[in-house]
Amino acid sequence: GAVVSQHPSRVICKSGTSVKIECRSLDFQATTMFWYRQFPKQSLMLMATSNEGSKATYEQGVEKDKFLINHASLTLSTLTVTSAHPEDSSFYICSASPTSGGAQYQETQYFGPGTRLLVL
Amino acid sequence: LAKITQPISMDSYEGQEVNITCSHNNIATNDYITWYQQFPSQGPRFIIQGYKTKVTNEVASLFIPADRKSSTLSLPRVSLSDTAVYYCTGGGATNKLIFGTGTLLAVQP
């Protein structure tokens, strides 16, 4: 139980284009989802907190107009990287917290497999 | 916000017990301590979670003293496939997860 998926697993795009990444909780509902970014050999950095039906909360230094987050349902959150540039190349990971579905650990976040973004 | 520190790396041999200690002096009262395992180019995988005292599941044990300023992840009889980065985190379901720096565990034959 408590499975989170991401799509796509990897994407290569040209500079200036926009890329959408989906995060889905497959066997539970999640009022809250989180988006992280991870650079090589570094820890995960929280970008934003996504709440179903309301605006996302962004961490300091993360541009909300560049990283658009939509959490339209209890099982889906999307991150859109707008006008991507090479410095946006990174590993993007989402997590979700069960609000129902019977997960053993209710006070935890379960992570997706990540999306590797390469901007040329 | 709590700062979480852990050793950068550890070495072990197959079959040994490995203990990774994490320091979190300022962890919030309502935060849980959760450990994750991460392989290259994959998302973190949940290992174990606790609030206080000792928790054990099928893959690990977690020891948290009464002051909650530190915690120790114990992996019994590691194998080569346990080579990964292990993250100590503080937080909860709807709280921000504070990640430690990560510990690269290298298991040798």
Image (cartoon, rainbow, N blue to C red):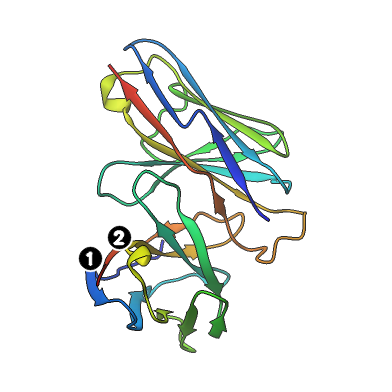
Residue B3 in view? no
At a point 37% along the width and 75% down the height, the residue shown is: B78
Residue B51 left/right relative to B36: right
**What is the quadrant of the N terminus of chain A in the image?**
bottom right
Which tag, 1 or 2, sits closer to the chain's start?
1
Residue A90 left/right relative to A100: left
Q: Residues within 10 Å of mark 1 (few under 14, many from 20)?
A: few
Q: Find disc 1 in the rendering and name its residue.
A: B8
Estimate the x, y position of residue B104 in percent, counting from the top left. Answer: 27, 63
What is the chain identity of the residue bearing mark 1?
B
Residue A93 left/right relative to B106: right
Disc 1 and disc 2 in contact, CB within 8 angstroms? yes
Estimate the x, y position of residue B27 in percent, counting from the top left. Answer: 45, 71
Q: Residues within 10 Å of mark 2 (few under 14, many from 20)?
A: many
Query: Looking at the rendering, which quadrant does residue A60 occupy?
Result: top left
**What is the quadrant of the C terminus of chain A in the image?**
top left
Q: Find disc 2 in the rendering and name its residue.
A: B101
In this view, A64 is above or below A97: above
Which SS class for mark 2? loop
**Amino acid at circle 1:** Ile
Estimate the x, y position of residue A99 in percent, counting from the top left. Answer: 73, 53
Mark seen at residue A43: none
Estimate the x, y position of residue A76 in percent, counting from the top left. Answer: 66, 34
At a point 69% along the width and 43% down the height, the residue shown is: A26
**Amino acid at circle 2:** Thr
In this view, A39 is above or below B100: above
At a point 26% along the width and 26% down the height, the residue shown is: A87
Which SS class for mark 1? loop
Query: Looking at the rendering, which quadrant does residue B19 occupy?
Result: bottom left
Query: Looking at the rendering, which quadrant does residue B50 occupy?
Result: bottom right
